Image (spheres, rainbow, N blue to C red):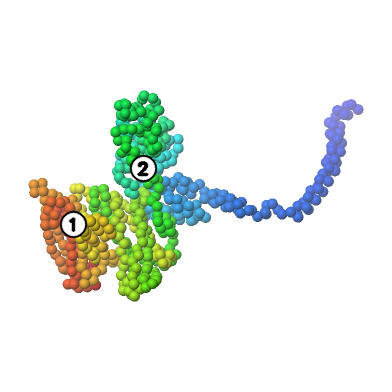
Amino acid sequence: MSMMCRSPQFRIAACLMLLVPFVAGRAQSSAPAGAAAAEQNQNAGDQPDPLKRQPSDKERRAQQKQLQKEIMGETYKKWLDVDVRWIITPDEAKAFKTLSNNEERDQFIEQFWQRRNPNPDSEENDFKEEHYRRIAYANEHFPAGKPGWMTDRGHIYIAYGPPDEKEEHPSGGSYDRPLNEGGGTTSTYPFELWTYRYLEGIGNNINIEFVDTCMCGDFHMTLDRSEKDALAHVSGAGQTLYEQMGMSTRQQRFQGSGIESLGNGPMGAMENAKQFDRISDAAKLMAPPPVKFKDMEQYLVTHKVLTGPVFPFDVRTDYVKVTNDTILVPVTVQIRNRDVTYQDKNGVSRGPVNILGRVTTISGRIAQTFEDTVDNPYPTELRDAKMQTSEIYWKALPLRPGTYRLDVVIKDVNNPDHVGVYSRSMTVPKYDDDQIGASSLILADKMEKVPSKQIGAGSFVIANTYIRPRLSDAPAIPVSFKRDQKLNFWMQVYNLGIDEKSRQNQATIEYQIVNLADNKSILDTSEKSGAISPNSDQLTLEKSLPLASLQPGKYQVTIKVNDEINKQQLAQSAPFTVE
């Protein structure tokens, strides 16, 4: 018996006998459980399915936000948060975030770069290329435990380009303070001083200081020039000039309420007065100028599609030298009265038109903004005569030589859907000292001298002359005059040679008007520069010609200047028609 129990066959049979009651028990215990489950399922049929429950408004908004974030993807997020972080406006960023699909985002990005393209007609975009070059430079030269584009130096470099001057103290150390910082010798943290000789819309000689107080390579922008002083809180060390002379104490550095802790010094009062200027400059560096016509700005920011009737208008730009670094750019806008919506009230017709203009640099920064309202009311009975005339708006903008983009939006106040948009590139010329140059040749319907108190002030005033440009109805059409009017033309000549012995210029100016139908000269005359202004290297040429003797047709006026001292020549021409 014991041998049978030990056999394999016996052990297998015994195990099977032991399993029988266990399996039976499992079956018995599972029966009521299955019945209970069936009963629960029957009861659950009377309850709403939690998976089919309608989400609340709050949950729906959260789901949409999460879905939009997922759809937006890393590529578009990087473009918004990294690529254009320092140049995109708040309105543009807000508009981009509301887009619902990638097709709209791609179109927005394309328009974003095109709006900043200094030459919209070109396939290449100099602004975009320059922008990504600056990002690459910032990442290479300004990293500090984070990418260079995220640092303050990277921000300023990307927004404004390389400074005109840079003072670097990469290791800090001994520093002789200038008198405007208190004088004396101290030791500093690493710091840099960037100087921009001129920034459009901000001013001249803009100084930006960066200091690395953590000694970790992270230079942050500061308005407090005393922040770089490593010995500011070390007793008896790094004294200012007045502290050395016993005229001030270190404690007095920290008793003021200004943004700096320079203490008393030879130029203390003057420097304290400049603190507001530094705050203002910093605000301008970081923020665009305010816009009065916010409803019109959308056409500049997002290039909103015009939905109403087209509002046509004409724009002309001219260039007049002020200094080597500043060029006056008069922008003339012509609006035909027949295109304006007028409303009559109490026998007076009014048709106000809002104008918003913006000039941006090649880096996309706003250089100039102008906004105004053109409104010239007139008696209602003169409506028919008024419809044959135009309103002229004029704004003179000081700009540095370079390439810019000019955008102008006009809006019919009495018909809000009546909007017109103009976008063009413009190149402000540079006048080199060793090269003869000239301003724009302006053909005007009105030109006269102004009183001394109005020199250089008011619309259509350049220097001491009131000159209202004549505009054509289209870029390819010459300006038009009637036979009972005068042809006025104005031009300045720059950098004429001066004879060393006589101290006088020696140039010949030729004036010519040609009939373009047969190329015959109608006018051909000349004069010497000495008869205009013999001791100046700059001439202003102003001429008026009655048109009664000219037959209707197309003509061209040309001014040639022959500088006999520098052996240089130039010529300017402008076509016009006589009706």
| Mark 1–mark 2 CB contact (< 8 Å) | no
The answer to whether 333 appears left or right of 85 in the picture is left
**Residue at (37, 73) in percent of width and height:** 347
Secondary structure under the numbered disc 1 in the rendered image: strand
Residue 31: percent from left, percent from top: 83, 46
Q: CA distance from mark 1 to mark 2?
A: 41 Å
Q: Which quarter of the image is occupied by the C terminus?
A: bottom left
Amino acid type indicated by mark 2: Phe
Whether residue 228 appears in this view of the structure is: no
Residue plotted at (65% across, 55% down) = 54
Label 2: which residue?
276
As drawn, the label of residue 445 is none
Query: Can residue 391 be seen in this snapshot?
Result: yes
Residue 211 appears left or right of 64: left
Q: Which amino acid type is marked by label 1?
A: Thr
Q: Is residue 210 above or below residue 361?
A: above
The mark lying in front, picked from 1 and 2, is: 2
Q: Which of marks 2 and 1 precedes in the sequence? A: 2
Residue 314 in percent (x, y) is at 32, 64
- Residue located 40% across and 48% down the image: 287
Q: Can you name the residue that lies furthest to the left here? A: 501
Q: Position of residue 168 (x, y in %)?
A: 33, 34
161 or 354, which lies in front? Answer: 354
Residue indicated by mark 1: 540
**The N terminus is located in which quarter?**
top right
Element class at badge 2: helix
**Image: 338 above or below 256:** below
